[in-house]
Image: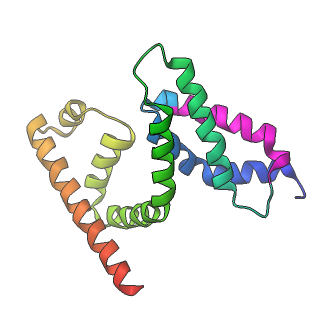
Amino acid sequence: MADPDKEFARLLTIHDRELRRYISLFVSRRDDVEEVLQQTAIMLWEKFAEYDPQREFLPWAIRFAYFEILNFRKQIARRRFQHSEETLLALAETRDDLAEELNRRRLALKHCLTKLNAHDRSLLERRYSDSSSVKSLAEETGRTVKALYRRLDRLRQLIYECVDSRIASDATLE
């Protein structure tokens, strides 16, 4: 590696979203996910000299994230219920087993979202990415809460069917 600092920044930037998704499997609050992600990045930075560039970065980084998740759980164990380490290990192994399928579904979802009109796509992004409440979105759009829930249900169903169809058509091409 010519410049390890640049290489580390490049790899972390490329895999940031996937690391965040992995952490959010085990940590529910968005702020906590960010905290664990930051701690993971610090550990990755400190251990980057030990990274073998012949191997994939993401599995190496996920291993650090897993241990940071365990550390985080120990820190907050007194605050609320936590899953056992066995449960976390089972979830991690299941996630590893399903990684390829999850990636295909994520790509299908991305494709299906592009088929929506801009208004519907924005509505979904605001509800699920920005965590806007249905009540606040209803007020902004001039709809009733009930009508907005129905619209969101219809959009979720459309996306579900589109993703399943896309996955099925990709499977027939293999």
Q: In the displayed structure, does residue 106 sit left or right of residue 35?
A: left
Residue 36 falls inside the magenta stretch = yes
- State whether residue 152 is above or below residue 66: below
Q: In the displayed structure, does residue 133 sit left or right of residue 55?
A: left
The magenta stretch is 33-51
Residue at 18% in and 36% down: 138
Residue 11 falls inside the magenta stretch = no
Quadrant the N terminus occupies: bottom right
Dominant secondary structure of the residues highlighted in magenta in the image: helix
Q: In the displayed structure, does residue 19 sit left or right of residue 152?
A: right
Q: Position of residue 55 (x, y in %)?
A: 74, 62
Q: Is residue 144 visible?
A: no
Residue at 28% in and 47% down: 123
Quadrant the C terminus occupies: bottom left
Task: Identify the colour scheme used.
Answer: rainbow
Q: Is residue 65 visible?
A: yes
Residue at 25% in and 61% down: 160
Q: Position of residue 94 (x, y in %)?
A: 45, 52
Quarter of the image where one finds residue 70: top right
